[in-house]
Image: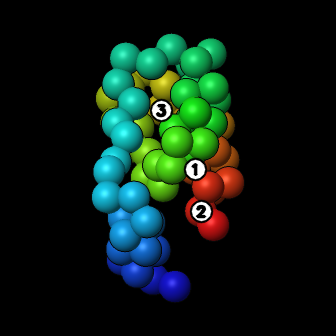
């Protein structure tokens, strides 16, 4: 599946994108899990975010929801 097709599929399931701004690194995993549990399929971590280096928990949470 191409990246565009994957995005289109995720956006079709939930036409919203969660943007994590001002989140502390120790909050990322819980927030990511809550967003996925709520049905979010797309989560953005801005490149200038202090959590970008710890975004892998958010990525794992998002991939868990990619059903």
- Residue 60 rendering spot, x and y as whole percentages: 66, 47
Q: Tell us which disc is closer to us: 3 or 2.
A: 2
Whether pointer 1 and pointer 3 mark residues with C-beta atoms closer than 8 Å, the reply is no
Quarter holding the C terminus is: bottom right
Q: In this view, does 24 lie to the left or right of 8?
A: right
Residue identified by numbered label 1: 62
Residue 47 can be seen, yes or no:
no
- Is 46 or 43 nearer to us in this picture? 43
Cα distance, mark 1 to mark 2? 6 Å
Residue identified by numbered label 2: 66
Whether pointer 1 and pointer 2 mark residues with C-beta atoms closer than 8 Å, the reply is yes
Of callouts 1 and 3, the N-terminal one: 3
- Residue 22 rendering spot, x and y as whole percentages: 37, 17
Q: Is mark 3 on a helix, strand or loop?
A: helix
- Is 21 or 30 nearer to us in this picture? 30
Mark 2 surroundings: few (<14), some (14-19) or many (≥20) residues within 10 A:
some
Q: Residue drawn at (51%, 50%), measured in percent from left and top?
A: 39
Q: Tell us which disc is closer to us: 1 or 3.
A: 1
Q: In which quarter of the image is residue 55?
A: top right
- Residue 7 rendering spot, x and y as whole percentages: 39, 69
Residue identified by numbered label 3: 52
Q: Residue drawn at (48%, 32%), measured in percent from left and top?
A: 52
Q: Residue drawn at (40%, 80%), measured in percent from left and top?
A: 5
Cα distance, mark 3 to mark 2? 21 Å
- Residue 58 rendering spot, x and y as whole percentages: 58, 39
Residue 10 can be seen, yes or no:
yes
Compared with residue 27, is residue 43 higher up or lower down, i.e. above or below?
below
């Amino acid at each position: 599946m191409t990246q565009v097709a994957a995005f289109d599929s995720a956006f079709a399931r939930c036409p919203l994108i969660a943007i994590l701004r001002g989140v502390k690194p120790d909050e990322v995993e819980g927030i990511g899990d809550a967003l996925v549990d709520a049905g979010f399929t797309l989560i953005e971590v801005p490149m200038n975010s202090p959590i970008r280096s710890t975004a892998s928990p958010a990525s794992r949470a998002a991939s868990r929801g990619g059903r």
